[in-house]
Amino acid sequence: MDPSKYHLSDFLEDDSFRKWASEVPSAEFDQWQKHFAASPDIQKKMLEARQLIRDLKEVQALPADRELEEKIWRSVQPGRSRFRILSLRRMAASVAILAGLGLGYYLYTQPARKEEGLSREIAEVNDSEQVRTVVLSDGTQVELSAGSRIYYGESFNQADRRVILEGEAFFDVARNPEKPFLVISNGLVTRVLGTSFTVSSNEKEVSVSVKTGRVEVISQENYEHLKDTDKRSSATLVLKPNQMAVFSKKEASLTRSLVADPLIVNPSALPATLSFDNTPAAEVFERLANAYNIEIIYDPDTFSQCRLTVSLEDEQLFEKLEVICKTFNAEYRLSDAKILIEGKGCKF
């Protein structure tokens, strides 16, 4: 087996390669991984063949397509027995089916990808029930959730770093200030230099939640039309750790809030720093804000006489706030990723 001498048809007829392309364990799987890493030329050939195999697999999963395929197969090979499912002859019949169904148009002109103009796009698909990790050529790691996929062009990490996401994925982006990383998903553009965040999309909305670093989000319409940097910045939301944005396609609205379960992001904020002993309210709120990197707004005069004695080391942030507010005769609410504390305060 010398893949450097393979043509596309050779890859398609190689049973061990088809297993590798479909991520099916085999004795030759690791060997194909080594071939893939050997040189850009071999990698390019393997990616093209893998993409064709995956696209055809999707088509053949559709009942209507299977029925039509049977008819075409019988007309192409009358009286002959069928052999390996992805043999070259079967592949030719399948290509004919794709042409008849116009699936090539479907695969390569879906609105989001067409608008982005990704030439000779490459797809990474997770059709399993487990999270699948994909490492892009720039070192970025993408954890694709079940049923999700990303697309990117052959020029990825050359002119820019741009991917299109369908579904949900966690991105740990390799830092490169010269080439911002863009994720386009269902009408929303997420722009970063190097950070980690999650993008989740469905037909109605897209959400972006930040784990580390700084993320910019803007509607795709504004991103495309507002070419001027200053104008584009005015339509952009900047997200920090523990913040999230939700884009509603129907209302074309982009809002910012806190994630459902904020985590401590300040390395110096050990759990012990959230153990209080007759601590003034101002210090309580300062420690909390510093630990979670969240702005807490309150009236210092109203809560000047409030003190707190309690250990809040293991509770989730909002549980901590419930305890504090009950002690301080107050309530909290969220506004644009900020926490507002309101109430009567303490009377002694």
Image (cartoon, grey):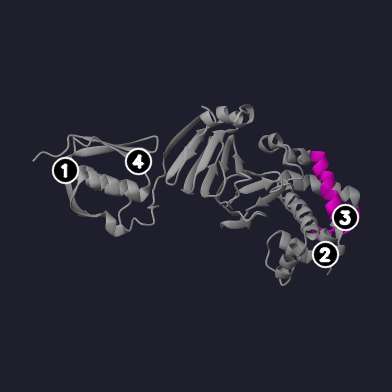
Q: Earlier in the sequence, mark 3 or mark 4?
A: 3
Do the residues under discs 1 and 3 have CB atoms within 8 angstroms? no
What is the C-alpha distance between the residues marked 3 and 4? 64 Å
Report whether 211 appears left or right of 293. right
Camera-side residue: 29 or 285? 285
- Residue of label 3: 89
Query: Pointer 1: residues within 10 angstroms few (<14), some, or many (20+)?
Result: many
What is the C-alpha distance between the residues marked 2 and 1? 73 Å
Look at the numbered disc 1 and give the secondary structure of its residue.
loop
Query: Pointer 4: residues within 10 angstroms few (<14), some, or many (20+)?
Result: some
How many numbered marks are there?
A: 4
Rendering quarter of residue 33? bottom right
**Dot 4 amino acid type:** Glu
Q: Start and end of the magenta stretch?
A: 78-101
Q: In the image, which disc is placed on residue 295?
A: 4
Viewer can see residue 271: yes
**Dot 2 amino acid type:** Pro
Which residue ends up furthest to the left in the rendered image?
A: 348
- Residue of label 1: 306
